[in-house]
């Protein structure tokens, strides 16, 4: 009977030791709520303060970035890297906001002195998103540039044809209180003459005549007007200023 009591007392203690050990070997379980962000319908806005650009990740880009946000270890103060180019990640999830800073190889929470090393470098994933926006500012000579501004009242879609079935798309969403409430960049491939965007929206690119479909229905909005580089920069600046 005495031995049974000792075993019963020892088992909870052993469980506590294993639990503490697991937290030490896998710091991301209790840091930055990374697991919770991955499980929620989170919205991530990436801000590059050097270039004054802010972009909202579409679903594919968000998932690609979250796959890279895996912490390998906590850095000691002496291991902190010297100041270098960094990105701000404004994460909205489950009615909460989280502000992170990463240079691609390390990550920390805004205002915190604790820094963690990432298992994988995520800078390439981030730069690929900014690269789409940069392509509209400096389109290559071979790119076919078209801009659509009257698809629907609240959004503008800018299209740049990159290859036979490949397009860059910028989606600018406007609100009543703010000039621009979201800017998303897509590196999209057309399938059966359609570009699928987030949600129920897709764009027909048949014969290079662009039309917007929502929930499978043609909107009838196929008016194309010039959207100047000056206007795009102004919209991006207002969006950046709101998120910086």
Image (cartoon, rainbow, N blue to C red):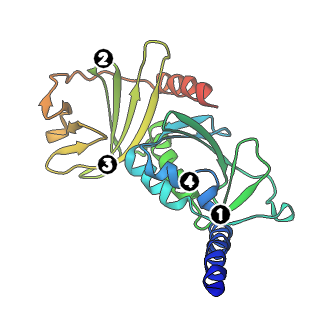
The answer for how far apart the CA atoms under marks 1 and 3 are is 35 Å
Helix, strand or loop under label 3 = strand
The answer for how far apart the CA atoms under marks 4 and 2 are is 36 Å
* Label 2 sits on residue: 153
Helix, strand or loop under label 1 = helix
* Residue 30 relative to residue 226: left or right: right
Which residue lies at the image location 50% right of the left edge and 16% below the top edge? Answer: 178
- Residue 159: x and y in percent read 33, 37
- Residue 176: x and y in percent read 43, 12
Query: Residue 91 appears in which quarter of the rendering?
Result: top right
Task: Please name which of the two marks, 1 or 2, marks the residue nearer to the observer.
Answer: 1
Which residue lies at the image location 59% right of the left edge and 60% below the top edge? Answer: 29
* Label 4 sits on residue: 34
Helix, strand or loop under label 2 = loop
Q: Earlier in the sequence, mark 4 or mark 2?
A: 4
Q: Earlier in the sequence, mark 1 or mark 4?
A: 1
* Label 3 sits on residue: 188
Q: Quadrant of the C terminus?
A: top right
* Label 1 sits on residue: 27
The answer for how far apart the CA atoms under marks 4 and 3 are is 28 Å
- Residue 167: x and y in percent read 31, 46
Seen from the viewer's position, the closer of residues 123 and 222 is 123
């Amino acid at each position: 009977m005495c031995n049974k009591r000792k075993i019963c007392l020892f088992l909870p203690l052993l469980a506590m030791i294993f639990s503490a050990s697991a937290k030490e070997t896998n710091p991301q379980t209790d840091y930055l709520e990374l697991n919770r962000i991955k499980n929620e319908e989170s919205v991530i806005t990436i801000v590059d303060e050097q270039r004054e650009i802010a972009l909202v990740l579409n679903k594919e880009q968000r998932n690609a970035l979250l796959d890279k946000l895996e912490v390998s270890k906590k850095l000691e103060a002496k291991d902190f890297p010297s100041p270098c180019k960094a990105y701000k990640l404004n994460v909205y999830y489950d009615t909460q906001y989280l502000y992170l800073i990463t240079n691609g190889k390390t990550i920390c929470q805004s205002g915190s002195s604790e820094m963690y090393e990432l298992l994988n470098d995520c800078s390439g994933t981030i730069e690929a998103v900014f690269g789409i926006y940069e392509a509209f500012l400096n389109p290559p000579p071979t790119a076919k540039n078209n801009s659509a501004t009257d698809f629907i009242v609240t959004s503008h879609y800018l299209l740049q044809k990159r290859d036979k079935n490949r397009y860059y798309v910028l989606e600018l969403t406007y609100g009543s209180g703010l000039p621009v409430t979201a800017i998303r960049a897509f590196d999209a491939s057309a399938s059966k003459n359609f570009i699928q965007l987030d949600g129920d929206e897709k764009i027909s690119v048949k014969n290079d005549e662009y039309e917007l479909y929502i929930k499978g229905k043609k909107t009838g909005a196929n008016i194309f007007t010039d959207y100047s580089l000056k206007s795009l920069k102004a919209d991006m600046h207002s969006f950046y200023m709101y998120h910086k």
